[in-house]
Amino acid sequence: MGLRAAPSSAAAAAAEVEQRRRPGLCPPPLELLLLLLFSLGLLHAGDCQQPAQCRIQKCTTDFVSLTSHLNSAVDGFDSEFCKALRAYAGCTQRTSKACRGNLVYHSAVLGISDLMSQRNCSKDGPTSSTNPEVTHDPCNYHSHAGAREHRRGDQNPASYLFCGLFGDPHLRTFKDHFQTCKVEGAWPLIDNNYLSVQVTNVPVVPGSSATATNKITIIFKAHHECTDQKVYQAVTDDLPAAFVDGTTSGGDSDAKSLRIVERESGHYVEMHARYIGTTVFVRQVGRYLTLAIRMPEDLAMSYEESQDLQLCVNGCPLSERIDDGQGQVSAILGHSLPRTSLVQAWPGYTLETANTQCHEKMPVKDIYFQSCVFDLLTTGDANFTAAAHSALEDVEALHPRKERWHIFPSSGNGTPRGGSDLSVTLGLTCLILIVFL
Protein backbone atom coordinates (compact mmCIF):
# COMPACT_ATOMS: atom_id res chain seq x y z
CA MET A 1 0.00 0.00 0.00
CA GLY A 2 2.90 2.36 0.86
CA LEU A 3 4.37 1.92 -2.58
CA ARG A 4 1.29 3.15 -4.40
CA ALA A 5 1.01 6.16 -2.13
CA ALA A 6 4.39 7.42 -3.35
CA PRO A 7 4.57 9.79 -6.31
CA SER A 8 5.08 7.92 -9.59
CA SER A 9 8.18 9.23 -11.38
CA ALA A 10 7.02 7.53 -14.59
CA ALA A 11 3.65 9.25 -14.43
CA ALA A 12 5.31 12.55 -13.58
CA ALA A 13 7.80 12.23 -16.40
CA ALA A 14 5.06 11.48 -18.90
CA ALA A 15 2.44 13.92 -17.62
CA GLU A 16 3.15 16.60 -20.19
CA VAL A 17 3.32 14.04 -23.02
CA GLU A 18 0.00 12.58 -21.95
CA GLN A 19 -1.61 16.05 -22.00
CA ARG A 20 -0.74 16.25 -25.67
CA ARG A 21 -3.33 13.56 -26.44
CA ARG A 22 -5.57 16.59 -26.92
CA PRO A 23 -5.00 17.52 -30.57
CA GLY A 24 -2.42 20.12 -31.31
CA LEU A 25 -1.23 20.99 -27.77
CA CYS A 26 2.51 21.38 -27.17
CA PRO A 27 3.91 21.93 -23.64
CA PRO A 28 5.88 25.16 -23.19
CA PRO A 29 9.63 24.53 -22.84
CA LEU A 30 9.61 26.05 -19.32
CA GLU A 31 7.02 23.55 -18.13
CA LEU A 32 9.03 20.74 -19.65
CA LEU A 33 12.18 21.97 -17.89
CA LEU A 34 10.34 22.20 -14.57
CA LEU A 35 9.00 18.69 -15.10
CA LEU A 36 12.51 17.39 -15.71
CA LEU A 37 13.89 19.20 -12.66
CA PHE A 38 11.04 17.84 -10.56
CA SER A 39 11.70 14.30 -11.73
CA LEU A 40 15.43 14.57 -11.11
CA GLY A 41 14.90 16.24 -7.74
CA LEU A 42 12.54 13.46 -6.66
CA LEU A 43 15.07 10.86 -7.67
CA HIS A 44 17.94 12.65 -5.95
CA ALA A 45 15.88 12.61 -2.78
CA GLY A 46 15.96 8.82 -2.91
CA ASP A 47 19.68 8.62 -3.62
CA CYS A 48 20.57 8.70 0.03
CA GLN A 49 18.50 5.56 0.55
CA GLN A 50 19.80 3.59 -2.43
CA PRO A 51 23.18 2.07 -3.35
CA ALA A 52 25.22 3.95 -5.93
CA GLN A 53 24.65 1.32 -8.62
CA CYS A 54 20.86 1.79 -8.65
CA ARG A 55 20.30 3.48 -12.04
CA ILE A 56 16.65 4.42 -11.80
CA GLN A 57 17.56 8.11 -12.13
CA LYS A 58 19.28 7.40 -15.47
CA CYS A 59 16.27 5.38 -16.66
CA THR A 60 13.86 8.23 -15.93
CA THR A 61 16.14 10.86 -17.44
CA ASP A 62 16.40 8.83 -20.65
CA PHE A 63 12.60 8.43 -20.79
CA VAL A 64 12.09 12.19 -20.43
CA SER A 65 14.65 12.77 -23.19
CA LEU A 66 12.90 10.31 -25.52
CA THR A 67 9.41 11.77 -24.98
CA SER A 68 10.02 15.49 -24.47
CA HIS A 69 9.62 16.30 -28.17
CA LEU A 70 6.67 13.99 -28.89
CA ASN A 71 3.40 15.57 -30.02
CA SER A 72 0.11 13.72 -30.36
CA ALA A 73 -0.92 15.77 -33.41
CA VAL A 74 1.96 14.23 -35.36
CA ASP A 75 1.28 10.91 -37.00
CA GLY A 76 3.11 8.07 -35.24
CA PHE A 77 2.82 9.44 -31.69
CA ASP A 78 1.43 6.20 -30.20
CA SER A 79 4.15 4.09 -31.77
CA GLU A 80 6.98 6.33 -30.55
CA PHE A 81 5.50 6.70 -27.07
CA CYS A 82 5.14 2.92 -26.68
CA LYS A 83 8.74 2.44 -27.86
CA ALA A 84 9.92 4.86 -25.18
CA LEU A 85 7.84 3.11 -22.50
CA ARG A 86 9.30 -0.29 -23.46
CA ALA A 87 12.80 1.18 -23.29
CA TYR A 88 11.98 2.61 -19.84
CA ALA A 89 10.66 -0.78 -18.70
CA GLY A 90 13.76 -2.55 -19.98
CA CYS A 91 16.02 -0.11 -18.16
CA THR A 92 14.19 -0.64 -14.86
CA GLN A 93 14.45 -4.43 -15.29
CA ARG A 94 18.20 -4.21 -15.79
CA THR A 95 18.65 -2.26 -12.57
CA SER A 96 16.02 -4.10 -10.52
CA LYS A 97 18.48 -6.05 -8.37
CA ALA A 98 20.44 -2.96 -7.35
CA CYS A 99 17.27 -0.99 -6.66
CA ARG A 100 15.56 -3.62 -4.53
CA GLY A 101 13.62 -1.90 -1.76
CA ASN A 102 13.97 1.56 -3.34
CA LEU A 103 10.67 3.43 -3.22
CA VAL A 104 11.33 5.55 -6.32
CA TYR A 105 12.18 2.46 -8.36
CA HIS A 106 8.99 0.61 -7.41
CA SER A 107 6.90 3.72 -8.04
CA ALA A 108 8.42 3.98 -11.53
CA VAL A 109 7.65 0.31 -12.27
CA LEU A 110 4.01 0.80 -11.28
CA GLY A 111 3.76 4.00 -13.32
CA ILE A 112 5.16 2.29 -16.42
CA SER A 113 2.63 -0.52 -16.09
CA ASP A 114 -0.25 1.94 -15.78
CA LEU A 115 0.87 3.99 -18.81
CA MET A 116 1.36 0.91 -20.99
CA SER A 117 -2.16 -0.20 -20.11
CA GLN A 118 -3.65 3.23 -20.85
CA ARG A 119 -1.90 3.49 -24.22
CA ASN A 120 -2.52 -0.18 -25.15
CA CYS A 121 1.23 -0.75 -25.56
CA SER A 122 2.36 -4.33 -26.01
CA LYS A 123 5.18 -5.50 -23.75
CA ASP A 124 7.01 -7.00 -26.72
CA GLY A 125 8.12 -4.84 -29.62
CA PRO A 126 10.74 -2.33 -30.73
CA THR A 127 12.22 0.06 -28.18
CA SER A 128 13.65 3.55 -28.49
CA SER A 129 17.36 4.17 -28.22
CA THR A 130 18.84 7.11 -26.34
CA ASN A 131 21.29 7.53 -29.24
CA PRO A 132 19.63 9.86 -31.77
CA GLU A 133 21.82 8.54 -34.57
CA VAL A 134 20.40 5.07 -34.03
CA THR A 135 16.77 6.23 -33.94
CA HIS A 136 17.14 8.44 -37.02
CA ASP A 137 14.44 7.54 -39.54
CA PRO A 138 14.73 9.54 -42.78
CA CYS A 139 11.05 8.92 -43.55
CA ASN A 140 9.76 10.12 -40.20
CA TYR A 141 10.04 13.90 -39.84
CA HIS A 142 9.16 13.64 -36.17
CA SER A 143 12.11 11.29 -35.59
CA HIS A 144 14.86 13.09 -37.49
CA ALA A 145 13.69 16.56 -36.38
CA GLY A 146 13.95 15.37 -32.78
CA ALA A 147 17.43 13.99 -33.48
CA ARG A 148 18.55 17.37 -34.87
CA GLU A 149 17.20 19.20 -31.83
CA HIS A 150 18.93 16.73 -29.53
CA ARG A 151 22.29 17.25 -31.22
CA ARG A 152 21.93 21.05 -31.09
CA GLY A 153 20.73 20.99 -27.50
CA ASP A 154 17.55 22.75 -28.65
CA GLN A 155 14.84 22.58 -25.99
CA ASN A 156 12.11 23.86 -28.35
CA PRO A 157 10.25 21.21 -30.36
CA ALA A 158 9.54 21.68 -34.06
CA SER A 159 7.12 24.53 -34.76
CA TYR A 160 3.99 23.78 -36.80
CA LEU A 161 1.71 26.01 -38.86
CA PHE A 162 -1.98 25.72 -39.79
CA CYS A 163 -3.89 26.84 -42.89
CA GLY A 164 -7.55 26.33 -43.71
CA LEU A 165 -10.04 27.18 -46.47
CA PHE A 166 -13.83 26.82 -46.32
CA GLY A 167 -17.08 28.52 -47.27
CA ASP A 168 -17.32 31.51 -49.58
CA PRO A 169 -14.23 31.05 -49.36
CA HIS A 170 -12.80 32.06 -46.03
CA LEU A 171 -9.04 31.68 -45.68
CA ARG A 172 -7.01 31.26 -42.50
CA THR A 173 -3.32 31.72 -43.33
CA PHE A 174 -0.22 30.25 -41.71
CA LYS A 175 0.04 33.55 -39.80
CA ASP A 176 -3.52 33.17 -38.42
CA HIS A 177 -4.78 36.02 -40.58
CA PHE A 178 -8.42 35.53 -41.54
CA GLN A 179 -9.68 36.76 -44.92
CA THR A 180 -12.76 36.43 -47.10
CA CYS A 181 -11.81 36.35 -50.77
CA LYS A 182 -13.20 36.14 -54.29
CA VAL A 183 -10.27 34.28 -55.93
CA GLU A 184 -12.34 32.82 -58.74
CA GLY A 185 -10.54 30.17 -60.81
CA ALA A 186 -7.41 28.19 -59.87
CA TRP A 187 -5.15 29.52 -57.09
CA PRO A 188 -2.18 28.02 -55.20
CA LEU A 189 -2.68 27.65 -51.46
CA ILE A 190 0.76 26.09 -50.95
CA ASP A 191 3.71 25.71 -53.32
CA ASN A 192 6.97 24.83 -51.58
CA ASN A 193 9.76 22.31 -52.07
CA TYR A 194 7.72 19.48 -50.56
CA LEU A 195 4.06 20.08 -51.28
CA SER A 196 1.76 21.86 -53.71
CA VAL A 197 -1.92 22.52 -53.04
CA GLN A 198 -4.13 24.22 -55.62
CA VAL A 199 -7.81 25.07 -55.27
CA THR A 200 -10.36 26.03 -57.91
CA ASN A 201 -13.19 28.33 -56.89
CA VAL A 202 -16.43 28.99 -58.77
CA PRO A 203 -19.25 31.55 -58.22
CA VAL A 204 -21.81 30.43 -55.70
CA VAL A 205 -24.87 32.41 -56.84
CA PRO A 206 -25.50 34.61 -59.89
CA GLY A 207 -24.80 38.28 -59.39
CA SER A 208 -22.47 37.76 -56.42
CA SER A 209 -18.67 37.97 -56.23
CA ALA A 210 -18.67 35.25 -53.56
CA THR A 211 -17.09 31.95 -54.64
CA ALA A 212 -16.57 28.49 -53.14
CA THR A 213 -14.17 25.62 -53.78
CA ASN A 214 -15.23 22.79 -56.10
CA LYS A 215 -11.79 21.28 -56.87
CA ILE A 216 -8.64 20.56 -54.87
CA THR A 217 -5.36 19.22 -56.26
CA ILE A 218 -2.57 18.14 -53.90
CA ILE A 219 0.91 17.11 -55.06
CA PHE A 220 3.23 15.37 -52.61
CA LYS A 221 6.60 15.83 -54.28
CA ALA A 222 9.09 12.96 -54.58
CA HIS A 223 11.29 12.75 -51.50
CA HIS A 224 14.43 10.59 -51.55
CA GLU A 225 13.60 6.99 -50.64
CA CYS A 226 10.42 7.93 -48.77
CA THR A 227 7.93 8.32 -51.63
CA ASP A 228 7.57 8.90 -55.33
CA GLN A 229 5.52 11.90 -56.41
CA LYS A 230 1.87 11.36 -55.53
CA VAL A 231 -1.06 13.41 -56.80
CA TYR A 232 -4.45 13.63 -55.10
CA GLN A 233 -7.44 15.29 -56.73
CA ALA A 234 -10.94 15.87 -55.41
CA VAL A 235 -13.89 17.53 -57.15
CA THR A 236 -17.47 18.03 -56.11
CA ASP A 237 -19.18 14.63 -55.69
CA ASP A 238 -15.88 12.81 -56.19
CA LEU A 239 -13.80 12.69 -53.01
CA PRO A 240 -11.64 9.59 -53.56
CA ALA A 241 -9.80 7.63 -50.89
CA ALA A 242 -6.81 7.10 -53.20
CA PHE A 243 -4.27 9.02 -55.24
CA VAL A 244 -4.87 9.47 -58.96
CA ASP A 245 -2.72 6.39 -59.68
CA GLY A 246 -5.06 4.24 -57.60
CA THR A 247 -2.70 3.74 -54.64
CA THR A 248 -3.47 4.65 -51.05
CA SER A 249 0.09 5.07 -49.79
CA GLY A 250 3.54 6.17 -50.89
CA GLY A 251 6.98 4.69 -50.27
CA ASP A 252 7.44 1.44 -48.39
CA SER A 253 4.01 -0.02 -47.72
CA ASP A 254 5.12 -1.17 -44.27
CA ALA A 255 6.56 2.18 -43.20
CA LYS A 256 3.57 4.10 -44.62
CA SER A 257 5.50 7.33 -44.89
CA LEU A 258 2.52 8.68 -46.87
CA ARG A 259 -1.01 7.35 -46.63
CA ILE A 260 -4.67 8.22 -47.14
CA VAL A 261 -7.28 7.41 -44.51
CA GLU A 262 -10.97 7.58 -45.39
CA ARG A 263 -12.97 8.79 -42.40
CA GLU A 264 -16.37 9.17 -44.09
CA SER A 265 -16.95 7.70 -47.52
CA GLY A 266 -17.29 10.41 -50.14
CA HIS A 267 -17.21 13.19 -47.54
CA TYR A 268 -14.02 13.19 -45.48
CA VAL A 269 -10.46 11.95 -46.05
CA GLU A 270 -7.17 12.52 -44.25
CA MET A 271 -3.66 12.41 -45.69
CA HIS A 272 -0.73 11.74 -43.37
CA ALA A 273 2.77 12.43 -44.72
CA ARG A 274 5.12 11.22 -41.96
CA TYR A 275 8.25 12.05 -43.93
CA ILE A 276 7.38 15.78 -43.88
CA GLY A 277 5.35 15.80 -40.64
CA THR A 278 2.28 17.02 -42.51
CA THR A 279 -1.44 16.25 -42.13
CA VAL A 280 -4.15 17.28 -44.60
CA PHE A 281 -7.94 17.08 -44.14
CA VAL A 282 -10.24 17.34 -47.17
CA ARG A 283 -14.03 17.39 -46.81
CA GLN A 284 -17.08 17.82 -49.00
CA VAL A 285 -19.89 19.67 -47.25
CA GLY A 286 -22.92 20.24 -49.44
CA ARG A 287 -21.71 21.10 -52.96
CA TYR A 288 -18.31 22.45 -51.98
CA LEU A 289 -14.96 21.35 -50.57
CA THR A 290 -13.00 22.43 -47.51
CA LEU A 291 -9.33 21.95 -46.69
CA ALA A 292 -7.21 22.09 -43.53
CA ILE A 293 -3.47 21.48 -43.28
CA ARG A 294 -0.83 21.30 -40.57
CA MET A 295 2.83 21.50 -41.62
CA PRO A 296 6.21 22.12 -39.95
CA GLU A 297 7.21 25.78 -40.22
CA ASP A 298 10.69 25.06 -41.59
CA LEU A 299 9.21 23.07 -44.49
CA ALA A 300 6.27 25.38 -45.15
CA MET A 301 8.67 28.32 -45.49
CA SER A 302 11.05 26.41 -47.78
CA TYR A 303 10.23 27.78 -51.24
CA GLU A 304 11.81 29.67 -54.12
CA GLU A 305 11.28 33.34 -54.88
CA SER A 306 9.14 32.38 -57.88
CA GLN A 307 6.75 30.53 -55.54
CA ASP A 308 5.69 33.60 -53.58
CA LEU A 309 2.04 33.45 -54.72
CA GLN A 310 0.74 31.19 -51.96
CA LEU A 311 -2.53 32.06 -50.28
CA CYS A 312 -1.60 30.17 -47.09
CA VAL A 313 1.63 32.18 -46.81
CA ASN A 314 0.71 35.68 -47.98
CA GLY A 315 -3.08 35.62 -48.05
CA CYS A 316 -5.29 36.69 -50.92
CA PRO A 317 -4.19 39.62 -53.09
CA LEU A 318 -5.84 42.88 -51.99
CA SER A 319 -7.82 43.05 -55.22
CA GLU A 320 -9.38 39.64 -54.42
CA ARG A 321 -10.53 40.37 -50.87
CA ILE A 322 -14.13 41.12 -49.95
CA ASP A 323 -13.62 41.56 -46.21
CA ASP A 324 -13.16 44.76 -44.25
CA GLY A 325 -9.41 45.01 -44.70
CA GLN A 326 -8.91 43.73 -41.14
CA GLY A 327 -9.60 40.15 -42.23
CA GLN A 328 -13.08 40.21 -40.65
CA VAL A 329 -16.35 39.61 -42.38
CA SER A 330 -18.28 40.92 -39.40
CA ALA A 331 -17.09 44.48 -38.97
CA ILE A 332 -17.01 46.62 -42.10
CA LEU A 333 -15.83 49.76 -40.39
CA GLY A 334 -15.52 53.04 -42.21
CA HIS A 335 -18.41 52.31 -44.60
CA SER A 336 -21.63 54.25 -44.41
CA LEU A 337 -24.78 52.23 -44.25
CA PRO A 338 -27.13 52.66 -47.20
CA ARG A 339 -30.39 54.44 -46.60
CA THR A 340 -32.27 51.25 -47.38
CA SER A 341 -31.29 48.51 -44.97
CA LEU A 342 -30.88 45.03 -46.35
CA VAL A 343 -33.28 43.14 -44.13
CA GLN A 344 -33.15 39.87 -46.04
CA ALA A 345 -30.16 39.10 -48.26
CA TRP A 346 -31.40 35.81 -49.70
CA PRO A 347 -34.74 34.03 -49.70
CA GLY A 348 -35.16 32.01 -46.54
CA TYR A 349 -32.74 33.84 -44.24
CA THR A 350 -32.81 37.07 -42.30
CA LEU A 351 -30.02 38.32 -40.08
CA GLU A 352 -31.92 36.99 -37.09
CA THR A 353 -32.58 33.50 -38.46
CA ALA A 354 -29.01 33.18 -39.77
CA ASN A 355 -27.62 34.17 -36.36
CA THR A 356 -29.88 31.63 -34.67
CA GLN A 357 -28.94 28.76 -36.97
CA CYS A 358 -25.21 29.42 -36.74
CA HIS A 359 -25.34 29.85 -32.97
CA GLU A 360 -26.82 26.36 -32.60
CA LYS A 361 -23.66 24.84 -34.12
CA MET A 362 -21.14 27.39 -32.85
CA PRO A 363 -21.99 28.85 -29.44
CA VAL A 364 -18.80 30.94 -29.39
CA LYS A 365 -19.40 34.02 -31.53
CA ASP A 366 -15.97 34.12 -33.11
CA ILE A 367 -14.97 34.65 -36.72
CA TYR A 368 -16.21 31.18 -37.71
CA PHE A 369 -19.65 31.97 -36.38
CA GLN A 370 -19.68 35.26 -38.27
CA SER A 371 -18.49 33.57 -41.45
CA CYS A 372 -21.37 31.16 -41.11
CA VAL A 373 -23.85 34.05 -40.86
CA PHE A 374 -22.28 35.79 -43.84
CA ASP A 375 -22.44 32.61 -45.96
CA LEU A 376 -26.08 31.95 -45.15
CA LEU A 377 -27.06 35.51 -46.04
CA THR A 378 -25.11 35.56 -49.32
CA THR A 379 -26.03 32.06 -50.56
CA GLY A 380 -29.12 30.82 -48.74
CA ASP A 381 -27.38 27.42 -48.53
CA ALA A 382 -27.72 25.81 -45.09
CA ASN A 383 -24.76 23.52 -45.81
CA PHE A 384 -22.41 26.44 -45.17
CA THR A 385 -23.33 26.18 -41.49
CA ALA A 386 -21.91 22.66 -41.41
CA ALA A 387 -18.87 23.83 -43.39
CA ALA A 388 -18.01 26.51 -40.82
CA HIS A 389 -18.56 24.09 -37.96
CA SER A 390 -16.33 21.39 -39.48
CA ALA A 391 -13.68 24.02 -40.27
CA LEU A 392 -13.56 24.96 -36.59
CA GLU A 393 -13.32 21.27 -35.65
CA ASP A 394 -10.35 20.93 -38.01
CA VAL A 395 -8.68 23.89 -36.32
CA GLU A 396 -9.11 22.22 -32.94
CA ALA A 397 -7.64 18.98 -34.33
CA LEU A 398 -4.65 20.46 -36.17
CA HIS A 399 -3.78 23.93 -34.91
CA PRO A 400 -0.78 23.67 -32.55
CA ARG A 401 -1.84 26.47 -30.18
CA LYS A 402 -5.13 26.21 -28.32
CA GLU A 403 -5.19 29.90 -27.39
CA ARG A 404 -5.42 30.72 -31.12
CA TRP A 405 -8.22 28.35 -32.06
CA HIS A 406 -10.81 31.12 -31.86
CA ILE A 407 -10.32 34.42 -33.68
CA PHE A 408 -12.43 37.36 -32.57
CA PRO A 409 -13.12 40.72 -34.23
CA SER A 410 -10.71 43.51 -33.44
CA SER A 411 -10.89 47.22 -33.86
CA GLY A 412 -8.82 49.12 -36.37
CA ASN A 413 -5.88 49.37 -33.97
CA GLY A 414 -5.82 45.61 -33.50
CA THR A 415 -7.21 45.51 -29.98
CA PRO A 416 -9.75 42.74 -29.27
CA ARG A 417 -13.33 43.75 -28.84
CA GLY A 418 -16.50 41.88 -28.03
CA GLY A 419 -18.67 43.50 -30.66
CA SER A 420 -22.35 43.93 -29.98
CA ASP A 421 -24.92 42.03 -31.98
CA LEU A 422 -25.94 45.37 -33.52
CA SER A 423 -22.46 46.14 -34.84
CA VAL A 424 -22.14 42.61 -36.22
CA THR A 425 -25.52 42.91 -37.88
CA LEU A 426 -24.73 46.28 -39.47
CA GLY A 427 -21.31 45.12 -40.54
CA LEU A 428 -22.65 42.00 -42.24
CA THR A 429 -25.33 44.03 -43.95
CA CYS A 430 -22.68 46.38 -45.34
CA LEU A 431 -20.50 43.51 -46.50
CA ILE A 432 -23.32 41.71 -48.24
CA LEU A 433 -24.14 44.86 -50.18
CA ILE A 434 -20.47 45.12 -51.20
CA VAL A 435 -20.48 41.47 -52.36
CA PHE A 436 -23.52 41.92 -54.56
CA LEU A 437 -22.45 45.20 -56.11
Image (cartoon, rainbow, N blue to C red):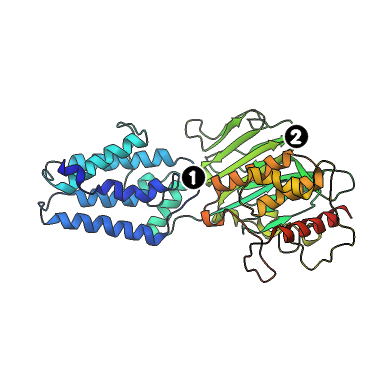
> Marks 2 and 1: in contact by CB < 8 Å?
no
Residue where numbered disc 2 is placed: 236
In-front residue for pair 399/235: 399
Amino acid of disc 2: Thr
Residue under the point 82% across and 41% down: 348
Residue 296 vs residue 147: left or right? right
Q: Quadrant of residue 281?
A: top right
Residue 132 visible in the displayed image: no
Closer to the camera in the image, 329 or 185: 329
Quadrant for the N terminus, please. Answer: top left
Is 217 above or below relative to 132?
above
Secondary structure under badge 1?
loop
Relative horizontal placement of residue 189, taking residue 130 as reference (left or right): right
Residue 216 or 127: which is nearer the viewer?
A: 216
Check the image and report above or below for 264 versus 72.
Answer: above
Query: Which amino acid, by three-letter code, is at mark 1?
Result: Val
CA distance separating discs 1 and 2: 29 Å
How many numbered marks does the figure carry?
2
Tag 2 secondary structure: loop
Q: Horizontal and vertical percent for residue 46?
A: 15, 54
Query: How many residues crowd around disc 1 within 10 Å: few (fewer than 14), some, or many (20 or more)?
Result: many
Image spot of residue 197 (x, y percent): 68, 46
Q: Residue at x 38, y 56 (%)?
A: 150
Residue 60 in sight: yes
Circle 1 sits on which residue?
74
